[in-house]
Amino acid sequence: MPKKLTVKHLERCVGCLCCVMACARERFNKLSVDKSAITVKAAGQTAYYAIVVCRGCIDPICLRACPTNALRKRRGGGVILDPSKCDACGSCKDACYLGAIKLDDQTGMPIICNHCGKCVNFCPHGILEMEEVEG
C-alpha cells in the first residue's frame, strides 16, 4: 500500500525546523529552508506553528494547472515532477490553495513534497507520520 505524509500532532511543533532541514538535505544535499518542500511558520500571534506541506490531494489541482504536463499523479495522492518537461512557469504554485509548492530561487523549478518520509525520521516531537492510503 502506498503511503503519504500527514501532519498528525501539530500542537507539539516547537519550530525547530528539523523536518525542513531533513527534506532539503534529502532532496538537494543542502541545509537550507529555501530547498525544502516543507515550510514551518509562526501561526499568527499565537504560540503555535503551521506546517505547510503537500497533503497528497487525490485530484491535484496543481497537476491540472501545469501547461507542459510536467506533473503526474503519484500513487496514493499528490504529484511527481518531471523536470525535463517543466518550464518553471509557476502555474502549479499559483494553483495550490495550501501554498505547499514553492519555486527554487536558483532554477525557478517547483519544489514539491514527494512523500518520501525522510522528515518523519528527523522530527523529535512525532508531529509527522507516514500514513498508508489506498492507491
Image (cartoon, rainbow, N blue to C red):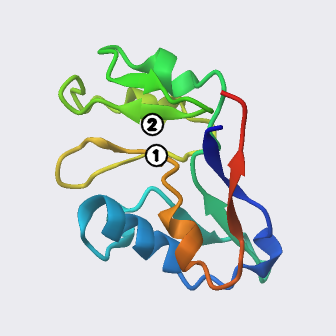
- Where disc 2 sits, the SS reads helix
Give the image quarter of residue 27. bottom left
Disc 2 marks which residue?
Answer: 93
- Where disc 1 sits, the SS reads loop
Quadrant placement of the C terminus = top right
- The type of residue carrying mark 1 is Asn
Q: Is residue 104 left or right of residue 129?
A: left
Q: Badges 2 and 1: C-beta atoms under 8 Å apart?
A: no
* Percent coordinates x, y for residue 54 in the rendering: 57, 46
Q: Looking at the picture, tell me which residue is in the foreground, 37 or 129.
A: 129
Q: Is residue 21 left or right of residue 98?
A: left
For the residues labelled 2 and 1, the Cα–Cα distance comes to 15 Å
Quadrant placement of the N terminus = top right
Q: Residue at x 24, y 68 (%)?
A: 29
* Percent coordinates x, y for residue 76 in the rendering: 62, 33
Q: Residue at x 32, y 73 (%)?
A: 32
Q: Is residue 123 left or right of residue 27?
A: right
Q: Residue at x 24, y 27 (%)?
A: 86
Indicate which disc, 2 or 1, sits on the residue closer to the N terminus: 2
- Does residue 96 lie above or below 121 as drawn? above
Disc 1 marks which residue?
Answer: 114
